[in-house]
Amino acid sequence: MSEPASEFAAVGECLCGAVRYGLRERLPPVGMCHCSQCRKVSGAGSIAVLAVRNERFAWLAGEDERQTFALPSGWSTVFRQHCGSPAPQPTPQGDPMWVPAGGLDGDPPLSLSGHIHVGSKPGWVIIGDDAPQFDEAP
Ligand SMILES: [Zn+2]
């Protein structure tokens, strides 16, 4: 299952290194979500994720080392319990995967697609880029 990193446009891992993944071909843009759930799980003003089609996503290690926490609404977050890092998780449709942008190694060439749930963003978060903003989800 493990493949050489050179096959990938980007690779990522959790802080302790147990969960590793690779992204193939063109990297999708980063979306920023400012909703209250994403702020709670990130501890920051927003969360940054890439929606990566399953055919372009590969587990390199630790797929089974992830834990899931789900709210009664069905909203869920997936993380590595040992180190607390967010981990890739399938979208509710099963494809694509949500991949945490901050988990990627180095500085892959990523663009920004936009900001969602800006309507619930706290006042101390100042958006300084010119990507599209949506009060809720588009
Ligand atoms: Zn959110």
Image (cartoon, helix red, strand yellow):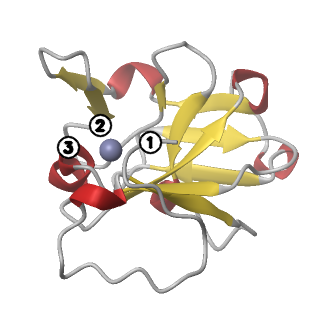
- Image quadrant, ligand 1: top left
Q: Is residue 35 left or right of residue 102?
A: left
Q: Secondary structure at mark 1?
A: loop
Q: Position of residue 79 (x, y in %)?
A: 29, 37
Location of residue 114 by image quarter = bottom right
Question: What residue is shown with label 2?
Answer: 79
Amino acid at circle 1: Ala
Q: Is the CB of the residue bearing disc 3 within 8 angstroms of ligand 1?
A: yes
Give the Cα distance between marks 1 and 2. Answer: 23 Å
Q: Position of residue 9 (x, y in %)?
A: 80, 53
Quadrant, the N terminus: top right
Q: Residue at x 55, y 82 (%)?
A: 129
Q: Residue at x 79, y 42 (%)?
A: 4
Which of labels 1 and 2 is toward the front? 1
C-beta proximity under 8 Å, tags 2 and 3: no
Q: Residue at x 34, y 26 (%)?
A: 65
Give the Cα distance between marks 2 and 3. Answer: 14 Å
Q: Is residue 75 left or right of residue 32?
A: left
C-beta proximity under 8 Å, tags 1 and 3: no
Q: Residue at x 85, y 49 (%)?
A: 26
Amino acid at circle 3: Gln
Which of labels 2 and 3 is toward the front? 3
Question: What residue is shown with label 3?
Answer: 37
Amino acid at circle 2: Phe
